[in-house]
Amino acid sequence: MTNKTGKLIGVGVGPGDPDLITLKALKAIQAAPVIAWPAGLEGPSLARTIAAPHINEDKIEIAIRMPMVAERFPAAQVYDEAALKIGAQLNAGNDVVVLCEGDPFFYGSFMYLYGRMVNDFSIEVIPGVSSIMATAAAVGAPLASRNDIMTVLPAPLDEETLFLRLRNVEAAAIIKLGKNLGKVRNVLERHDLINCARYIEHATMDNQSVKPMCDVIGETAPYFSMILVHKRIDAWK
Amino acid sequence: MTNKTGKLIGVGVGPGDPDLITLKALKAIQAAPVIAWPAGLEGPSLARTIAAPHINEDKIEIAIRMPMVAERFPAAQVYDEAALKIGAQLNAGNDVVVLCEGDPFFYGSFMYLYGRMVNDFSIEVIPGVSSIMATAAAVGAPLASRNDIMTVLPAPLDEETLFLRLRNVEAAAIIKLGKNLGKVRNVLERHDLINCARYIEHATMDNQSVKPMCDVIGETAPYFSMILVHKRIDAWK
């Protein structure tokens, strides 16, 4: 009998299509006795849904439930409690996989667990296909190429910051749209970039939708949406 | 007997670790009778090496060989010829997979084939794990989080452009280092960001190496290297 402490593994499960999970993620999920996953206060976890075909019935599961609001930083208490539960499993010698939508370290909530646990436990991160790469594939146009400068802009930033940071880049991904869609439209119009912008909802999922930004109406967008901007809109030609 | 034209499929095979390929990429590689891959003028193809465990012996293979120089844009003639060879297979009814290191649309050479063929053929892109996500996992620190602005900067840009574009971002990935390493070091020193920068070679490969930028000497770096900068170096704490 050994008392070896378990390993914490942050696993990127990809953007939505269950087949966009990596072999390495799959093996980690199959091997670990404990699976933790983030979710809203009610309802299913997207990360768990993506990984569901690979999760056996005999797993111990830990839900990390919090308000899913794009603008709000997550409640520290939720992560404190999750770190305690996960830590108890690790101390009992069990490896714990934390399922992460997309990639764990690209604007992912996994960092909140990582920060709480990295000094006390062995942690591995398995990178995943990010929503920005999935979105470019869905649109059918390169994210960036040659010596393009590419910038990722979170839409909750104020309008002047968004305007200034879009000025000198060839390509941008504007993320966390939510109720910021109208503000982002203003910024694109001020730069005369509406016709260089593509809007994508639910990339790689069954309900994927891609539109030119000029056809997108309204002031809000769903949580899983993004705008890609490329000043040379047909850069690949 | 049908005369259906084949489909061109750009497949991201991930950053180097063969297990960082997706199930979707795997299935596409196994199903297609023809596999094309980029390589230098001599020697093996990294993309093909990554995918090798999944390539049957009965495939038709098309090599796309070109000078592997970070700064030089690839020769149009090489892609013109590759597009002709691939097009002939598609017209014969064969699906053709093009293997791409990392993600096909993130600074990938696949765009050169895409641009030549998108008007005449059906093309699908299967996104892959990008080197920037793999690099963040190797370093053990988030690429970007919360409302960070993150920028991808190609090192061949001139020093003043690199300096200006690093000014107002929280996080950056500096790619295509090659013989630009000394210039990039100057830029980081001018911003007093050397201690916020991490250097990575061959992320996820057997010869992976991660160093603080302050420990990196010399003026050149290998093709598969990258610098990650995060102004809040311990942003996850």
Image: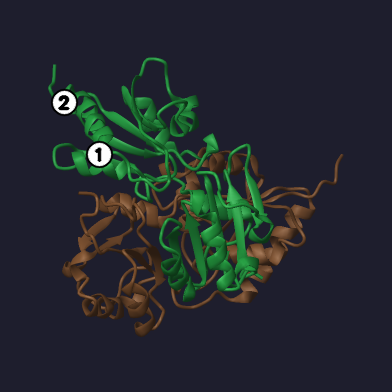
Chain colours: A brown, B green
Q: Is residue B54 left or right of residue B8?
A: right
Please give the name of the residue rendered at 17% of the width and 69% of the height, measured from the top-left corner: A214
Please give the name of the residue rendered at 62% of the width and 55% of the height, measured from the top-left corner: B139
Q: Is residue B217 left or right of residue B76?
A: right
Asked if residue A141 is positioned above or below residue B233 in the image, the reply reads above
Query: Do the residues under discs 2 and 1 have CB atoms within 8 angstroms?
Result: no
Q: Nearer the viewer, residue A35 or B193?
A: B193
Q: Is residue B147 visible?
A: no
Please give the name of the residue rendered at 52% of the width and 41% of the height, measured from the top-left corner: A54
Residue B156: image quadrant is bottom left
x and y percentages locating residue A205 in the rendered image: 34, 52
Q: Nearer the viewer, residue B22 or A167?
A: A167
x and y percentages locating residue B86 in the rendered image: 24, 28
Q: Secondary structure at mark 1?
A: helix
Q: Quadrant of the N terminus of chain A?
A: top right
Decide: few, some or many residues near mark 1? Use Cα within 10 Å; few <14, some 14-19, many ≥20: few
Residue B76 shows which numbered tag?
Answer: 1
Q: Amino acid at mark 1?
A: Ala
Q: Chain of mark 2?
A: B
x and y percentages locating residue B188 in the rendered image: 56, 67
Residue B91 shows which numbered tag?
Answer: 2
Tell me, yes or no, whether dots 2 and 1 are on the same chain: yes
Asked if residue A29 is positioned above or below residue A142 in the image, the reply reads above
